[in-house]
Amino acid sequence: MKTLRHLIAIGLLTGLSISLGNAVEIRNFANPEQQARYETLIQKLRCLVCQNQSLGDSDADLARDLRNEVYGRIQSGESEEETIQFLTDRYGDFVLYDPPVKGITLFLWTGPLLLFLSGGFLAIRHLRSHRLNPSRPPLDPEEKNRLETLRNQLRQGKSD
Amino acid sequence: MRFLIPLGVFLVMVIFLGVGLSLDPREIPSPLIGKPAPAFDLPTLEAPDRRFGPHTLKGRPYLLNVWASWCEACRAEHPVLIDLARRGEVNLIGLNYKDTPEKARAWLEAHGGNPYQAVAVDANGKVGIDWGVYGVPETFVVDANGIILYKHTGPLNRKVLTEKILPLLRTPQDPRAKTP
């Protein structure tokens, strides 16, 4: 009984999230390739109004207009690249979630790798310096005495 | 000396975060700067049978202001536009974006009048897409050769107008600018 109720609850919750996630119009395509092209495109493209959503996820007015634009272009037989070019000509690389590698985005692409490498370099250097010259503090007189007595005990033990 | 290293790292982070905070994430650089203004041919708000497009203004610099009656921020910049029109220094063109002519006319009347020399009606927003419009109001500065020099996103204010936009429009006609 309890499991059934849980299952219903889960079903309701997931069903709800699916219906919320689909703010997108129903589209008809001449062939499945065009449909696939459209669906990958609207996920790749970023909504300019609500900047953390893709065109496909956004319910903004502009996102709807741009989806219509993409739909029209795909239907007229445009390739993915041509449609992306159309949008970047107007809105810049900002509409792409994956900006192309060029001068201004070079640091964006290489930054994480550079950080990783410099971190690794520092870590190795640190570990090495520790192994070669152990920077432990020198023994104080009391410790020296203890060490001496221990050594004596060892020596006596051997001679016995 | 060793304590300087974390301090240095901290300062670098402060600089990066400070720059990040001072940037406006809504300000997206337009790829159209330095490019010819996208052509259009649209009916005007004043007379639907009269058409308007950038070609109408060939040889004259102008400001294209994208606005709509449903746009809240447009209300804030409207007095600035009216003041600009009164001074008559620049050609001010409106692009009424995704609006209806009736609402647009009523809005102008209710908010201090029509500052535009002409208003092109972009009812379905297609021209807006060509100009890369993503947040109304937006203002484009177009020079006498039809090249987009500058774009301002968000409501215009006097500071932006006097410091950024007007100097751009004055320079080409200013005879003093040519003398070395």
Image (tube, rainbow, N blue to C red):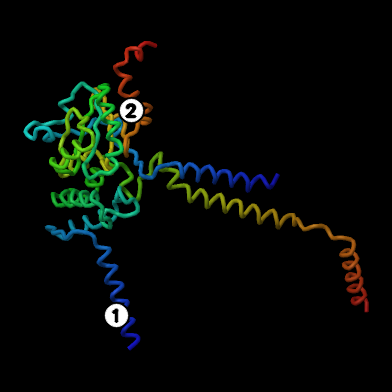
Location of residue A131 (image quadrant): bottom right
Helix, strand or loop status at disc 1 = helix
Label 1 Cα crowd, 10 Å radius (few <14 / some 14-19 / many 20+): few
Between A121 and B47, the residue placed more toward the observer is: B47
The span from disc 2 to disc 1 (Cα, nearest Å) is 60 Å
Q: Are marks 2 and 1 on the same chain?
A: no
Residue B165 is tagged as: 2
What residue does disc 1 label? A8
For the point 83% across and 57% down, the residue is A138
Could you tell me which chain the residue with mark 2 belongs to? B
Q: Amino acid at mark 2?
A: Ile
Q: Position of residue B103 (x, y in %)?
A: 16, 42
Question: Quadrant where the C terminus of chain A lies?
Answer: bottom right
Amino acid marked by disc 1: Ile
Q: Residues within 10 Å of mark 2 (few under 14, many from 20)?
A: many
Q: Mark 2 falls on what kind of element?
A: helix
Left or right, A67 with respect to A109, comes to: left
